[in-house]
Amino acid sequence: MHNESEYIVEAEATRVRVLSEALPYMQQFRGQTVVVKYGGAAMKDSSLKAKVIRDIVFMTCVGIRPVVVHGGGPEINTWLGKLGIEPQFKNGLRVTDAPTMDVVEMVLVGRVNKELVSLINQAGGSAVGLCGKDGDLIKARPQGDTGVGFVGEVNSIDARLVKSLVEAGYVPVISSVAADENGQAYNINADTVAGELAAALNAEKLVLLTDTAGILRDYKDPSTLIPRLNIQEARQLIEDGIVAGGMIPKVTCCVRSLAQGVRSATIADGRIPHALLLEIFTDSGMGSMIVASKYIQ
């Protein structure tokens, strides 16, 4: 019996320590905007998905203002298959012809977006679904790379609608579809949208949930994780080829948002349950955090 009561005291002490550790972060982030890019395994695995949704609602309950930006690649492929359209990729980018763009817009804006909105609302939050077309939130322009069709870049952001929703206590859930000045729809990389939106909202923090442990010195060895770095170090890692492949656009988008005033940007492992809470509310954090300079806490 003695051992059991010791165990209970230990468990309670751990619980109290966790809550106590979270307090300074609650104080730091209260009233601040945090932009979360949601995608990858955390979106496909239903138990991980439920935890991300709970984390987002938890953030709102302690006064943080989350804004969610999402992609939805796997579901797009499923629907292209149902409609007999062959998915094509070039240099890692989805080739988006007109029929594909129709499907991308239907799936991201109609299905994925509304499912996330509904899940957040069921968990006790108040979510509103948007895409780049709403309130002229994002103006798109074609990406320089020819041959990928309607794949766009962010030309400009007008964040007034998102700001007013956040101030009214809503969680904006944004799909990365936007139109150019002629009304042509474009598919934009969701990481890019999250980074640019974080800058436009003057967010305190940007978190990209990914299917990697973070930035690794050796991509085959998770123990070589770089937990913290600044803009200069991040750029150097790209130059040295340590950050390569699909990690380059993620790191670049973090660096761009920091250069425009976002305080910190983290590439976190969305395959770990409650990655968002671990990143925001614990001293050790999650993944790789990039800050503007060494001196920012």
Image (cartoon, rainbow, N blue to C red):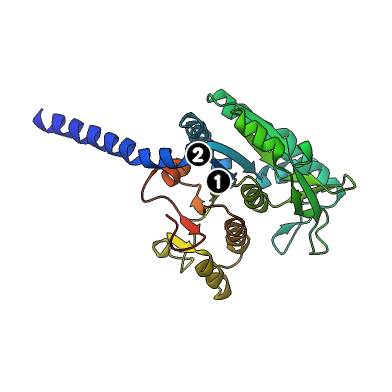
User: Residue at horizontal 60%, vertical 39%?
Assistant: 67
| Residue holding disc 1 | 41
Picture coordinates of residue 249, whole percent (x, y) = 63, 61
Q: Is residue 209 left or right of residue 132?
A: left
- Is residue 115 in view from this perspective? no
- What kind of residue is marked 1? Ala
Disc 1, SS? helix
Could you tell me if the residues under marks 1 and 2 are in contact, i.e. CB atoms within 8 Å?
Answer: yes
16 and 246: which is toward the camera: 16
Number of residue marks: 2
- Is residue 263 in view from this perspective? yes
162 and 273: which is toward the camera: 162
Picture coordinates of residue 205, whole percent (x, y) = 53, 48
Q: Is residue 81 left or right of residue 168?
A: right
Q: Residues within 10 Å of mark 2 (few under 14, many from 20)?
A: some
Which quarter of the figure is the N terminus placed in? top left
Q: Residue furthest left?
A: 2
Q: Residues within 10 Å of mark 1 (few under 14, many from 20)?
A: some
Occupied quadrant, residue 144: bottom right
Which quarter of the figure is the C terminus placed in? bottom left
In the depicted structure, whether residue 185 falls above or below residue 287:
above
Picture coordinates of residue 147, whole percent (x, y) = 83, 62
Which one is earlier in the sequence, the residue at label 1 or at label 2? 1
Picture coordinates of residue 75, whole percent (x, y) = 68, 42
User: Residue at horizontal 59%, vertical 25%?
Assistant: 121
User: Residue at horizontal 79%, vertical 59%?
Assistant: 143
Occupied quadrant, residue 153: bottom right
| Residue holding disc 2 | 48
289 and 76: which is toward the camera: 289
Cα distance in 3D space between marks 1 and 2: 8 Å
In the depicted structure, whether residue 29 falls above or below residue 151:
above
Disc 2, SS? helix
